[in-house]
Amino acid sequence: MSHLPCIEIEPRQQADAAVIWLHGLGADGHDFEPIVPELHLPAGYNVRFIFPNAPSIPVTINGGIVMPAWYDILGLGSERSLNEDQLLDSARKVQDLIDREIERGIDSRRIVLAGFSQGGAVNYQAGLTYPKPLAGMLALSTYFPTSHRVQVAPANESLPIEVYHGSYDPMVPELMANAAVEKLRDLGFQPGYKSYPMEHAVCAEEVRDISQFLQRILA
C-alpha cells in the first residue's frame, strides 16, 4: 500500500506510542517538527512523531494556486464551503497511517491524532470513525465540517479530545471552534476547551498544554 509521505521523529528507545500530526493549508510535514523538543516529554515517553505531507492541489479560495492541502476550500465564512470528497479521502489516508502504526507494533490505544486547521478538520473525521480505540485527539485552530454526517465508531465514543484555539484567529474564527465543541457534546463527548490570546498560530502556553495532555493520556 502507498502511504502519505511523512517526516518521522523516533524516540531514543523503541517507540511504544505514536502521534500523527497533520499540518494546515499551504504548509508541510516540517511545519510542526520543531515543536517536538519543546514538548519536553519526560524520559519513558517513547513517542514516535509522524508528520504527513498533504498532496499539492489547486485551492479555489487562493485563486486556484496549487499548494499542499488536505482538501479544496471553495468559500470562507462560518459555514465553510469545501470539497468534502477530498476531505473524506484524506481521512482514509490518515486511517491508513494508523493501520501502519499498529502493524509496526503500536497499540491503537497509544496512538494520538493531532491536527492544525485543515489537518484538524480531517482528523475529526478520521479519528471519530476509526474502528479501534485511540488514545486521544488534539484539535488545534480548527473546525468540524463533517459533523453533519460523521458516524462515530463505538470504539471511540469516549475518545479524549482537547480543542485549543486562538481568540483573535482571523482565518478560523473562534465561533467555529465553539460550534465544534457543541457538536462534540451533542455526540456524547466531553471535550476540553481552551483559548489563547493569539491569531491562527500556536503559542508557548499551548505547547505546554499539549505536552500535559500527551503525558496524561500516554502515562
Image: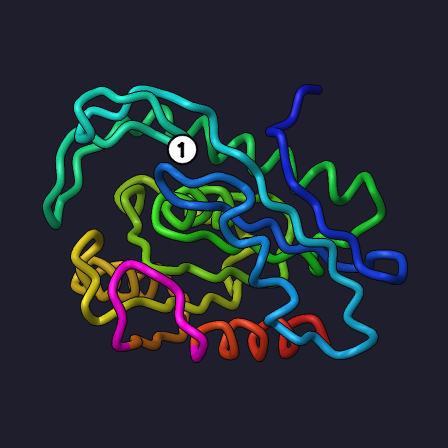
Q: Residue furthest left?
A: 77
The boundaries of the magenta stretch are: 197-205
Q: Residues within 10 Å of mark 1 (few under 14, many from 20)?
A: many
Q: Give the percent coordinates (x, y) of residue 117.
A: 35, 50
On the image, the x and y values in percent for residue 177 come to 26, 62
Q: Position of residue 218 (x, y in %)?
A: 69, 71
Residue 176 lies left or right of residue 164; in this view the side is: left
162 lies above or below 47: below
172 displayed left or right of 98 = left
Residue denoted by label 1: 70
Q: Position of residue 22 (x, y in %)?
A: 50, 46
User: Residue drawn 57% across and 39% down?
Assistant: 52
Residue in the foreground of this view, choosing between 89 and 171:
171
- Up/down of 77 relative to 66, above or below: below
Residue 201 magenta-highlighted: yes
Residue at the spot 17% in from the left edge and 23% down from the top edge: 63
Helix, strand or loop: magenta stretch: loop
Image height of 200 relative to 196, above or below: above
**Which quadrant would the N terminus be assigned to in this image?**
top right
Displayed quadrant of residue 197? bottom left
State yes or no: residue 149 in magenta.
no
* Residue closest to the far right: 13
Quadrant location of the C terminus in the rendered image: bottom right
Residue type at numbered disc 1: Trp
